[in-house]
Image (cartoon, grey):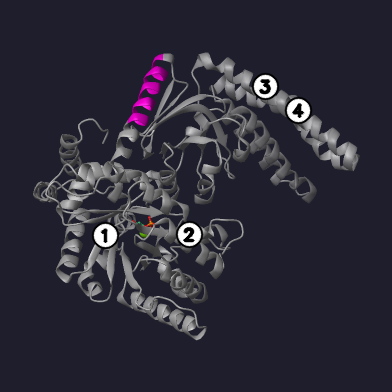
């Protein structure tokens, strides 16, 4: 049994067999095994060679029959490499002498082999590097387990283990039988994490090397509540987790009973709880969980498909579906937040050197005005179908907001000329997610119809911590006193200016911060639909005077640890049975 600790994405427990998803650029970190595991690693290697030679033999015969001997020769060469005794002996001696894990030993020897080909002067032989890479992958696939890269065809529920997942891969997980996820990479507010949370899949990320510590077929527990992954659990541990799994199912049943109860504090203050969505059908999921509307629709996920940019009509259709799913409740459509870890990076020829500080969000839209206006037209066309609001992301300066407003007017004129009706008085707000916007909040309040605080980015930029980087994830926390004070000041300024203010970062859905957020005056929180019941439960247990007292105390602390401990104690007093 091996216990690995990472960062939690979604609470809950998933128990199942591991499937390893191979990343493109597969790197096997150095790992040794205890002496008594050496024989098992040698056996694993032996099995991988046998299996690979068998697979290659079949491919050779198939090509021979269908395309002739010359085509089949590629695989004859591969078989030749694998039957070379010296190669196998080099891998075996790394395992025997250095106690290296089979995957590491294979990867190391195969990479040396590749290097030898790369140094050759004959271009034909240099070409062989790709073949060697192919052979390495085949062996690793066999050593680390079956089933990778074929998620669409899984026949039974599994735990997905990978180095990392792109937001696009994550977007397709619900079409598969994956019931829990463990990743080497990632941090709590990366977009991959946000999507996992939306799907409600128990997940632990930022585990560093889980993809090489677990093999395909190993029994695994993903404990999303305690940030743990347990590989090869013993019978007692497995029993305990089966009990916890059942307890979670009971808890979600109890929480869903809250759906039709109003979201009010003990002193009858109404608190609006909205959904963050990435895909139009989630609006209906939110409605079914008792949401008051869509507080954030991340439209850039329309790009996460092989066809690329969505047309105006395709966008209109998506917005229409979301608006209908909200059944008359407000829908806040955020314009494309492209760049950083979303879409443009995967397609650009020259990668951003510093993507989080690069051409992203509103900057990207303003530099691609045709794309931006197409989106604005689609939103405006859909604006007559319900209570639609428009929001622009990552505003840093007043000029950016004004330019976005001008683009909106242009789009309105286009529609007017074409005789298409739209809501000419659509409310336009901004996401407050940069320190500059927080400092200039009073000026912004004069220009916007509403404000939505995006703490995911605000924390990133205020604390100078890349939100998607597991190496610095311990520095990324919403409990930082500077953040708490910034939030207090922003909310205060909005209340004074009578500008509606909501919060839609992940913090809004974390029960740990609910009382604090109420205490500084927020009455509108937007979160993954799955978080709504628990936050609602807490709101119904607290009064605003209690919340104000807690917020004042939280704001008096100097360190994040004090803040977290204090808020955890206060929340536990309210929810003694729930894991916080
Ligand atoms: C945020 O930054 O807090 C936010 C809600 O937007 P996103 O997570 O999509 O960047
Ligand atoms: Mg953001």
| Mark 3 surroundings within 10 Å by alpha-carbon count, few (fewer than 14), some (14 through 19), many (20 or more) | some
Identify the image quadrant of residue 461: bottom left
- Numbered range of the magenta stretch: 236-250
- Mark 1–mark 4 distance (CA, rounded to whole Å): 60 Å
3D distance between C-alphas at marks 1 and 2: 24 Å
Q: Secondary structure at mark 3?
A: helix
Residue occupied by mark 1: 502
Task: For the C terminus, give its image quadrant.
Answer: top left
> As displayed, is residue 2 above or below residue 289?
above
Residue drawn at (52%, 83%) of the image? 418
Q: Which residue is mark 3?
A: 47
Q: Is residue 80 visible?
A: no
Quick one: label 4, few (<14), some, or many (20+) residues within 10 Å? many
Q: Residues within 10 Å of mark 1 (few under 14, many from 20)?
A: many
Mark nearer the viewer, 1 or 2: 2
- Between the residue at mark 2 and the residue at mark 4, the CA separation in whole angstroms equals 51 Å
Ligand 2 shows up in which quadrant of the image? bottom left
Cα–Cα span, label 2 and label 3: 51 Å
Residue 90, image x, y percentages:
66, 26
Task: Say which residue label 2 marks.
Answer: 321
Q: Which mark is residue 576?
A: none
Front residue (pair 345, 385) = 385
């Amino acid at each position: 049994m091996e216990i690995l600790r990472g960062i939690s994405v979604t609470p809950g427990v998933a128990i199942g067999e591991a499937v390893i998803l191979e990343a493109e650029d597969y790197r096997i970190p150095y790992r040794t095994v205890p002496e008594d595991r050496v024989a098992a690693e040698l056996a694993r290697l032996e099995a991988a060679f046998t299996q690979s030679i068998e697979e290659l033999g079949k491919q050779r015969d198939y090509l021979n029959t269908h395309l002739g001997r010359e085509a089949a020769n590629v695989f004859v060469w591969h078989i030749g490499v694998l039957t070379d005794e010296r190669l196998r002996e080099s891998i075996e001696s790394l395992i025997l002498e250095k106690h290296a894990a089979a995957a590491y030993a294979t990867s190391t020897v195969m990479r040396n082999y590749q290097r030898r080909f790369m140094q050759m002067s004959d271009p034909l032989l240099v070409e062989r590097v790709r073949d060697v890479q192919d052979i390495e992958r085949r062996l690793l696939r066999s050593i680390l387990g079956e089933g990778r890269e074929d998620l669409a065809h899984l026949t039974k529920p599994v735990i997905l283990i990978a180095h990392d997942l792109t937001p696009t891969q994550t977007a397709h997980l619900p079409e598969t039988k994956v019931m829990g996820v463990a990743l080497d990479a990632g941090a709590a507010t990366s977009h991959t994490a946000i999507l996992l949370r939306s799907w409600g899949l128990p997940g632990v990320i930022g585990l560093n090397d889980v993809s090489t510590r677990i093999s395909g077929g190993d029994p695994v527990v993903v404990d999303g509540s305690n940030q743990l992954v347990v590989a090869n659990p013993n019978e007692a541990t497995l029993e305990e987790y089966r009990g916890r799994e059942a307890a979670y199912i009971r808890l979600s049943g109890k929480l869903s009973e809250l759906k039709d109860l109003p979201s009010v504090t003990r002193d009858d203050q109404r608190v609006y709880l909205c959904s963050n969505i990435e895909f139009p059908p989630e609006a209906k999921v939110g409605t079914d969980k008792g949401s008051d509307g869509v507080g954030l629709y991340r439209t850039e996920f329309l790009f996460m498909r092989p066809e690329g940019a969505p047309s105006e009509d395709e966008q209109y259709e998506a917005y229409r579906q979301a608006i209908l799913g909200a059944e008359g409740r407000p829908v806040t459509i955020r314009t494309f937040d492209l760049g950083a870890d979303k879409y443009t990076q995967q397609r650009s020829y020259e990668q951003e050197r510093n993507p989080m500080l690069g051409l992203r969000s509103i900057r990207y839209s303003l530099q691609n005005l045709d794309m931006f206006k197409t989106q604005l037209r689609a939103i405006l066309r859909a604006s007559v179908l319900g209570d639609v609001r428009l929001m622009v992301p990552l505003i840093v300066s007043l000029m950016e907001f004004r330019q976005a407003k001008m683009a909106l007017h242009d789009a309105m004129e286009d529609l007017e000329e074409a005789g298409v009706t739209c809501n000419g008085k659509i409310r336009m707000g901004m996401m407050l997610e940069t320190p500059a916007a927080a400092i200039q909040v009073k000026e912004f309040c004069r220009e916007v119809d509403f404000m939505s605080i995006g703490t995911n980015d605000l924390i990133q930029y205020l604390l100078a911590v890349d939100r998607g980087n597991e190496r610095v994830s311990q520095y990324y926390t919403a409990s930082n006193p500077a953040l708490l004070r910034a939030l207090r000041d922003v909310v205060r300024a909005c209340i004074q200016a009578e500008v509606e203010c909501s919060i839609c970062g992940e913090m809004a859905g974390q029960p740990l911060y609910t009382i604090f957020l109420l205490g500084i005056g927020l009455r509108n929180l937007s979160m993954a639909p799955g978080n709504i019941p628990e936050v609602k439960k807490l709101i119904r247990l607290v009064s605003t005077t209690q919340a104000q007292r807690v917020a004042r105390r939280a704001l008096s602390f100097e360190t994040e640890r004090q803040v977290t401990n204090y808020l955890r104690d206060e929340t536990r007093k309210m929810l003694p049975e729930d894991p916080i």
